[in-house]
Image: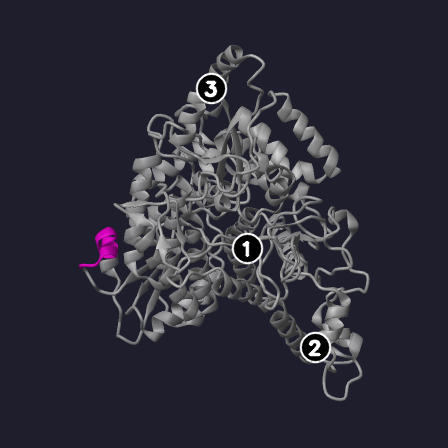
């Protein structure tokens, strides 16, 4: 069993009975005699993973995942007790306090099991394959026999339909995905469940893409409204950290108010893209402000000096420097008294209302706290306030007789004062592990932000992150899973775990985005090189699709292919989107063949419950529409070219293909697209733009306004038929 999951269950019931129940479960395996009182460190002490190091002083005799643990299990004839979690998980901390730090529980575990701790972010393959728990002592022979049968069943059920038995899903799958999202949509506060509520950026990606490709359809317009309303409510909610910026992992309630306070890099990355899409689709600057908000947090608090991105910040922290126990949200929440004392100045000179009064009104701060006790099972948030916007800035201004701009400035001043005070609090734990897939997500998101918001700072930060990947996470033409920062901020490789399919998929996507932002084909070359390596290492040549893991790891008994887009989209979903984009950028028809094979492999899922694979359904949308090819005949770096690129990135064209014709006949792009030789810059100071679709090109234009008009009025073209 995944005991991070069990930890969540334990914390929702009364603690002492739950602990007694856990002790009875362990005792049923046989009382042990181990003495754990003198244990200071276990076998985790030499690991690099922050999560494993957190458990190095548990009285449980933890092993890291590996041959030493397996040999001990065989030698002592014991079952393995597998506990999987991550270092910033609140409920994992609860499980540790209630069970793994308890000497009596540790005594039972040590006597009856070989105990293994796994960082699920370091070894996601272990987390997703090993999820079975039984009792060993009752009948060892029967268990061994059952184990063989279980593995046979798991192997059989993990296989997807054989090649050639299915066809590529059509528009019905797309329509069903929209219908399923629409039926699960919660209209009042947005989102696609009642509570708890997760951001689910893959859903936004589908809705924005569907609208961009079918802007005149009524259902697409409704989908756009669903996405924009949800993102607005999230922005105003407590899941958004209004003081230190960035977003927490999810909300415990339906209003996006009380979060679990850990902040994950993968959420910041995906939400950056979602809010960029919202800005492009709506033109509302508030969405662009949220993008800058997220990136301020990431570049300030989740960035290594060499360019990598850290994994997460913890939900729990010490409420005061001399406190003995951490509390959830202690770094983030406020009492009414604190805010009143910190913000005594008038909202503007001569005005009777104080900053505190305006701030408390706008962010719903009350004297007794604003957290529902049902969202606070441990009473850690009693009398505390989680900031959530009560009104718009304009409405708050009217309430206190100041104009919108004055109110905006006052709230910004108040937030800065509170931010400065917050920095004096004990900081939550930082997981400084730098995961390859999440670094790919983030560099791709920042590159796109730089292009859409015309901010060179973001593009330079994305370039620095890409160089970090190639320097530290790419060895012998393969990707590693993660690297770590030591106490001197030097990069450490740890156990050199090789990358998984999702690491390859997200780095490829990041490099494609970086190419689109810079038109530097070196990143496109690397995307192709890494794509070919992913095909070599992970492609199932017999059954199609990408396995999660490479072959050869005997500790992983099943090579699985994920069939669900969760907090992170599955590797096959991201990869099929990459293949479609690269097919047209590189002229690689074999990539299109692989994409179609993936659609066929997952056709049953896509036809029946596409809401489980919204990211893959988005890729299916792109496959069904012919690409919009935009050829720019000009000099890279020229002002005229930059202005044309600005227009392209300001429009919602998810199926676009950007090619540069700069008369460099020996370049990489010309070697892939011989037709580029037909397009020529007129002068060094002018760029001509050609927009082509369905093998038809419109007349070239040479001004940004003309290009915008063509892109907005090109109309809907008929979709490509599935082969």
Residue holding disc 2: 407
| Viewer-nearest of discs 2 and 3 | 3
The region drawn magenta spans: 666-675
Residue holding disc 1: 429
Q: Quadrant of the N terminus?
A: top right
Q: Are marks 3 and 1 in contact (CB under 8 Å)?
A: no
Tell me the CA gap for discs 3 and 1: 38 Å
Q: Quadrant of the C terminus?
A: top left
Residue 250 percent coordinates (x, y)? 63, 50
Residue 124 percent coordinates (x, y)? 46, 38
Residue holding disc 3: 77
Tell which circle, 3 or 1, labels the residue nearer the N-terminal end.
Answer: 3
Q: Secondary structure at mark 2?
A: helix
Q: Callout 2: few (<14), some (14-19), or many (20+) C-alpha neighbours within 10 Å?
A: many
- 376 sits left or right of 555 in the view: right
Residue 588 percent coordinates (x, y)? 29, 44
């Amino acid at each position: 069993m995944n005991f991070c999951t069990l930890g969540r269950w334990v914390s929702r019931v009364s603690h002492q009975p739950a602990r007694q129940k856990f002790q009875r479960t362990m005792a049923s395996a046989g009382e042990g005699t181990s003495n754990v009182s003198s244990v200071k460190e276990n076998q985790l002490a030499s690991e690099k993973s922050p999560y494993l190091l957190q458990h190095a002083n548990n009285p449980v005799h933890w092993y890291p995942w590996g041959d030493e643990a397996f040999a001990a299990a065989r030698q002592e004839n014991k079952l393995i007790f597998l506990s999987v979690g991550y270092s910033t998980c609140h409920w994992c901390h609860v499980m540790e306090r209630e069970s793994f730090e308890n000497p009596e529980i540790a005594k039972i575990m040590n006597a009856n099991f070989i105990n293994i701790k796994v960082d699920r972010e370091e070894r996601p393959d272990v987390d997703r394959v090993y999820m079975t728990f039984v009792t060993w002592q009752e009948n060892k022979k029967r268990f061994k026999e059952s184990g063989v049968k279980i593995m046979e069943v798991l192997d059989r059920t993990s296989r997807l339909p054989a090649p050639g038995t299915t066809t590529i899903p059509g528009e019905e799958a797309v329509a069903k995905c929209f219908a399923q999202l629409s039926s699960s949509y919660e209209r009042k506060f947005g989102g696609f469940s009642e509570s708890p509520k997760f951001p689910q950026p893959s859903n936004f990606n589908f809705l924005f893409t569907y609208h961009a490709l079918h802007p005149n359809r009524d259902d697409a317009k409704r989908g756009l409204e669903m996405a924009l309303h949800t993102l607005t409510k999230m922005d105003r909610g407590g899941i958004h950290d209004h003081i230190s910026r960035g977003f927490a992992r999810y909300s415990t309630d339906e209003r996006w108010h009380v979060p679990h306070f850990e902040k994950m890099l993968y959420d910041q990355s995906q939400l950056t893209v979602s809010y960029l899409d919202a800005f492009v689709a709506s033109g509302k600057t508030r969405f662009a402000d949220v993008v800058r908000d997220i990136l301020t947090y990431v570049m300030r608090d989740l960035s290594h000096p060499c360019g990598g991105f850290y994994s997460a910040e913890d939900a729990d922290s010490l409420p005061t420097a001399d406190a003995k126990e951490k509390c959830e949200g202690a770094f983030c929440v406020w009492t009414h008294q604190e805010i009143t004392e910190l913000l005594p100045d008038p909202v503007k000179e001569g005005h009777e209302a104080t900053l505190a009064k305006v701030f408390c009104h706008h962010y719903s701060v009350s004297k007794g706290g604003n957290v529902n006790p049902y969202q606070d099972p441990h009473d850690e948030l009693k009398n505390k306030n989680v900031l959530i916007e009560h009104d718009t800035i304009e409405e708050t201004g009217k309430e206190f007789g100041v104009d919108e701009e004055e109110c905006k400035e006052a709230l910004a001043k108040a937030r800065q004062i509170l931010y400065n005070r917050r920095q004096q609090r004990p900081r939550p734990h930082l997981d400084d592990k730098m995961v390859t897939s999440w670094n790919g997500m983030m560099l791709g998101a920042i590159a796109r932000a730089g292009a859409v918001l015309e901010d060179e700072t973001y593009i330079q930060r994305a370039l620095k992150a890409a160089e970090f990947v190639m320097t530290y996470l790419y060895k012998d033409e393969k990707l590693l899973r993660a690297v770590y920062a030591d106490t001197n901020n030097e990069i450490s490789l740890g156990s050199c775990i090789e990358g998984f399919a999702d690491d390859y998929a997200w780095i490829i996507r990041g490099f494609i985005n970086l190419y689109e932002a810079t038109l530097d084909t070196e990143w496109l070359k690397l995307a192709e090189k890494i794509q070919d390596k992913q095909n070599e290492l992970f492609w199932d040549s017999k059954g199609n699709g990408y396995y999660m893991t490479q072959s050869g790891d005997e500790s992983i008994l099943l090579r699985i292919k994920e069939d669900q887009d969760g907090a992170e989209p599955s590797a096959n979903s991201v990869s099929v989107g990459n293949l479609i984009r690269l097919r047209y950028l590189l002229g690689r028809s074999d990539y299109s063949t692989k994409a179609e094979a993936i659609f066929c492999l997952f056709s049953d899922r896509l036809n029946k419950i596409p809401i489980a694979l919204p990211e893959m359904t988005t890729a299916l949308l792109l496959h069904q529409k012919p690409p919009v090819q935009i050829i720019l005949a000009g000099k890279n770096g020229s002002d005229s070219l930059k202005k044309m690129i600005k227009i392209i990135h300001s429009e919602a064209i998810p199926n676009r293909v950007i090619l540069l014709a700069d008369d460099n006949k020996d370049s990489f792009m010309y070697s892939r697209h011989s037709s580029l030789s037909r397009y020529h810059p007129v002068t060094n100071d002018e760029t001509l733009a050609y927009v082509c679709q369905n093998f038809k090109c419109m007349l070239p234009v040479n001004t940004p306004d003309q290009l915008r008009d063509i892109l907005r009025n090109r109309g809907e073209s008929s979709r490509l038929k599935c082969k």
